[in-house]
Amino acid sequence: MQGRPPARLTRLPSWLLSQAALAGHRAVNEQLAAAGMRRHHFTILVALEEDGPASQADLGRRLWMDRSDMAAAVAELEGEGLVSRRRDERDRRRNVVAITPAGRARLARLAERVDAAQRLLLEPLTDAERRELVGLLRRVVEHHQAAA
Amino acid sequence: MQGRPPARLTRLPSWLLSQAALAGHRAVNEQLAAAGMRRHHFTILVALEEDGPASQADLGRRLWMDRSDMAAAVAELEGEGLVSRRRDERDRRRNVVAITPAGRARLARLAERVDAAQRLLLEPLTDAERRELVGLLRRVVEHHQAAA
DNA sequence: CGAATGTCAGGTCGACTGACATAG
DNA sequence: CCTATGTCAGTCAACCTGACATTC
């Protein structure tokens, strides 16, 4: 006997988003934890590989992450040799963070696992529905990132 | 200069869900905090009003909440007189939790604020798209709740 | 004897605030 | 002078674990 959530909540977008995001976190965390990583580490590596070296503040703006959390996560990645960090000589306030070869290799392995988690997460949806969902979510997310 | 997230993340369902859920949390928390409440308090009141009195374990199963967090949240609600708690005489392990008149009144006010937050959250979508999104999310959530 | 319930202590992660030194 | 950057200390909500006494 499992018990269903109140109908009022199953019509509430913010509650559904919470629960769906939680299911996603469980699936993704399980994969990343096996490699001793967390979600922030993964997204930082993705951003560095896709768009090249960047300052921490810049990464934070693009990934919608807090400056102080970024500082901690980058330090951890550096400790594992997955990113490098050096002073920007043109603007000596900044750290230029770049992905290393080891970082790229790690990212490639992680990406497979993360993709597998997506398939589990979206199992009940058809391919067309998955694209539909992604498109709708993207518009919501873009709207709120633009607003802040 | 704001900077966009990496395209790879804007195609990743779990990342989009995370970000959208975060936007929802911000909107909803802002409304609830004004009344000194958190999201759990709200969902518990909704469940009790919609389906009547229930034990804490039962509420936890329906709201997908942990037993120990439930104990704390119910204690707080009881402290404010928004729910009542008594021993179930048929099964003396259980607490029967019920919403009080004060709880219903509070819920009515909260619901308006939470609905306003939904409108802000889904602002960029048409009505048809909102229904579409809710339908897709519901199927994802139901699937994962059934699995656990 | 299990198994379920309520409770508590404690851990972790992620979002966030406030402060500070340094650099522009 | 004000602002941006990186860093640190610390708060908070939510998720989760493990334990325990009580009751079925």
Image: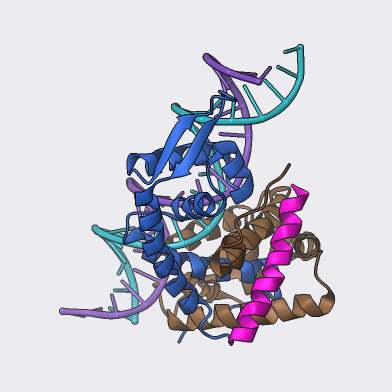
Chain colours: A blue, B brown, C purple, D cyan
Would residue B42 be seen by someone viewing this image from the given angle?
yes
Residue toward you, B110 or C23: C23
Q: Residue at x 64, y 85 (%)?
A: A128
Q: Residue at x 59, y 78 (%)?
A: A5
Q: Residue at x 47, y 59 (%)?
A: B69
Work out whether A104 lies above or below A24.
above
Residue A136 shown in magenta: yes
For the N terminus of chain A, give its image quadrant: bottom left
Q: Residue at x 81, y 80 (%)?
A: B128
Q: Position of residue C9 (x, y in %)?
A: 34, 46
Would residue A7 be seen by someone viewing this image from the given angle?
no
Work out whether B46 lies above or below A79.
below
Q: Which residues are magenta?
A: A126-148
Q: Position of residue A95 (x, y in %)?
A: 51, 32
Residue toward you, B16 or B102: B16
Per the picture, the main secondary structure of the magenta-coloured stretch is helix
